[in-house]
Amino acid sequence: MSTKEKLTFDVIVVGAGLAGSAAAAIAARNGLSVAMIERGQTPGSKNYFGGALYTHSLLEIYPDLWDRKPPLERPVTESGFWFLSKDGMVRATVQGGKMQNDPIDAYVALRAKFDAWWAEQAKKEGVFIIPKTVVVDFIREDEKVVGVITDRPDGEIYAPVVIICEGVNNLLTQKLGLAKHDLKAHASALAVKQLISMPAETINARFGLPSNEHGLAASVMGDVSMGLPGLGFLYTGVDSVSVGVGVTLEALTKAGIKPYELLQRYLNHPMIAPMIAGGRLMEYGAHIIPEGGWTTMPKLYTDGALVAGDAASMVNALHWEGTNMAIMAGKAAGETAVEAHQKRDFSAKSLSAYRARLDKTFVMTDLHQYRNLSHFLKSRPDFMNTYPAFLNDALGMFFSGFGKPKKQLYKDILRSLTDRRPLVKAAGDMIAFGRTIMGF
Amino acid sequence: MFHALVSIKQVPDTTNIRIDPETNNLIRQGVPTILNPYDAHAVAAAVEWKRKLNGKVTIITMGPPAAITSLRECIEMGADRAILISDRAFAGADTWATSYVLTEVIQAVHKEDPLDLIFFGKQAIDGDTAQVGPGVAVRLDLPVVTYAVKIHEVNTAEKFVVIERKTESRNEVIKAKLPAVMTCEKEIADIPYASLPDLVYSLRYEPEVWTTEGPITFDPAQLGLKGSPTTVFRTGTPEKHKAGEVLKTAETGVDVAVKTAFDKILEVEGVASMLGVQR
């Protein structure tokens, strides 16, 4: 049957996620032979997110995206924050205006469906996909990576460049010494979600969406995380709703709260429960998000290897960006592999062009700018409970203070803040928040 | 040389399947398809004996072009040749028409390269009829051993096979003349984990495609819907089994409990007349 010849490709991509299939497609499009190795039964079967994908990044790989009919759910035409108090909610969402950009900036998606399609597009570029196979180590010659070892018998595959897109559990990146440590509990969020199925008409009615061509993406703050550093979310699919919450592993451990308790509590919140009432639970899943960003980012290249996506901690927790960073990084890695083949130079020095490419994009500039965010949220828990609760009180008082002297009303509102947090400290919080997101 | 043929089917993964509560139809949309699990074990068994006897395994399937994925999976397990029998004319076939087509193909393969053993899974997890294997055996006029759990011996020189089969009450060990047909339980063999070169070979493997155009000819009257005497009137979800009544003998006494139980049994339609009991 098969001969025992050495399996050799120009490029090996480890992991058929958003970064992997992007990197593989770019390399194959430029004439390289590419093997993409995926541990799941099919690409996408092991991948999970909130979530929404960002159009700009998809177009970056496939300018003819729409002709290819991507399996996306609803476009995000309304987006924003929901602030939960114990029994109430303030919504600050935006719709119309820039949310109607052409094309719409974000689309809700389901990864099992989307990633299978995304890999299929790479296959059309000529990528050879090897599923059901786990890469366990590297083949090295003179300290240079020249291939990978898989868990199968006779499991070696050779290539002068290996692009590691292994996801958040970056064991291979650690094995190469690019990441100096295992996942950090304070910089890793555990997100749990339920996918709840409901008829499209019910979703439209409950979320005020005029048609299936409208969708909502909400970041939920306040009572959702029980005061721990974390956020909830809600995304509308065509006939499903994704509802979940993510909190850092460290906070969960310290508080002794089980993630599914947190999620159950969120789903039972008096403002949330009616939205999903009667829906059918289709999926229950969890995933770790490498929220450390810049602070936990490994070195991105070495002799014969590059790292992209979650494995490289490319996540902006505040803006829910990660998928687009993974795709942009995958593209840059693919381009760098092509260039290295042209120069026939696969040294770390040659592959450092990958980092240079990324430095010019929002990926690196944003991650640098937000480098203090996870520390900030951890050290200022008031953003997670005090302010969302105050916001609910303040607006609640403002809109229910009829027939009372308004001077007293404003005093009461102010007191509902100062009872929770002295004014000076609150002002300090705001300044610190501003400094953090501006990256000073 | 030992030559085995395995007939497989690609099926919707019923562990993921849902039923539309209103129409009672299977919701196939978005449900992944897989190699029928019993067939996978049949392939594993065929490959195991091919390796023992230094033989060859041929896989056949009748189905849509997408079934190539399942054929590749069989090649990955170590099969040597795969044939996809695919044509619009075959669509809508019941087990009768399916066994006709498979029989024709098996006979053609046998003519080229004589077969010793013909494997089927014990049933497909989507239709659960368990009819196609025995149906083919009858058409071929070959011995058939159903619910096989173990192959004790394959003797190609003296042309016999010893197979253990499972029944509800006991296991039977059966000696059958070769060529023979068998339908397999999962115990027949464990699914092997392919080497990387074998996996890569299978991913690149292009199965032969047989259609009504050739390489063999079929009787058009026996194909597809036209050749299918079975009509499905209605499908539905069976009623949920209700929890039975619990009687505590300490409270009711044994006599009352036994009498109540008997009365309940007699209420079941047909039981009273079968036992000749007047109610």
Image (cartoon, grey):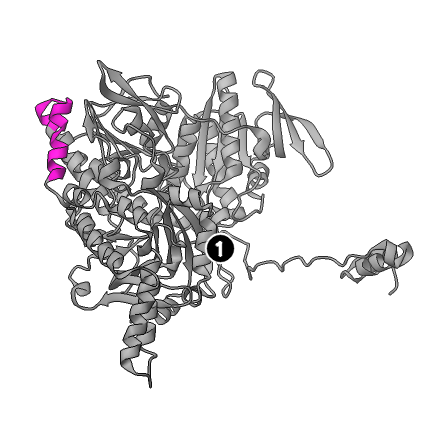
Towards the viewer: A88 or B119: A88
Q: Secondary structure at mark 1?
A: strand
Q: Position of residue A386 (x, y in %)?
A: 34, 59
| Residue lying farthest to the top in this orientation | A142
Q: Residue at x 22, y 23 (%)?
A: A159
Q: Look at the image and tell me in which quarter the C terminus of chain B lies.
A: bottom right
Outermost residue, bottom direction?
A: A403
Residue A143 lies, in percent from the top left, at 23, 16
Q: Position of residue A113 (x, y in %)?
A: 34, 49
Image spot of residue B225 (x, y percent):
47, 54
* Type of secondary structure dominating the magenta stretch: helix
Question: Is disc 1 surrounded by few (<14), some (14 to 19) or many (20+) residues within 10 Å?
Answer: some
Residue extent of the magenta highlight? A340-359
- Assess whether residue A259 is covered by the magenta stretch: no
Is residue A209 shown above or below B27? Answer: below
Does A354 lie within the magenta span? Answer: yes
The kind of residue on which mark 1 rests is Arg
Image side of residue B173 versus residue A327, left or right: right
Q: Is residue A91 left or right of residue B172?
A: left
Q: Which residue is mark 1?
A: B18
Indicate whether B2 appears above or below B110: above
Which quarter of the picture shows residue B270?
A: bottom right
Task: Provide the chain ID for the residue under circle 1.
Answer: B
Toward the viewer: A275 or B226?
A275
The answer to which image quadrant residue B219 occupies is: top left
Identify the residue at image location x=31%, y=37%: A167
Q: Nearer the viewer, residue B98 or B187?
A: B187
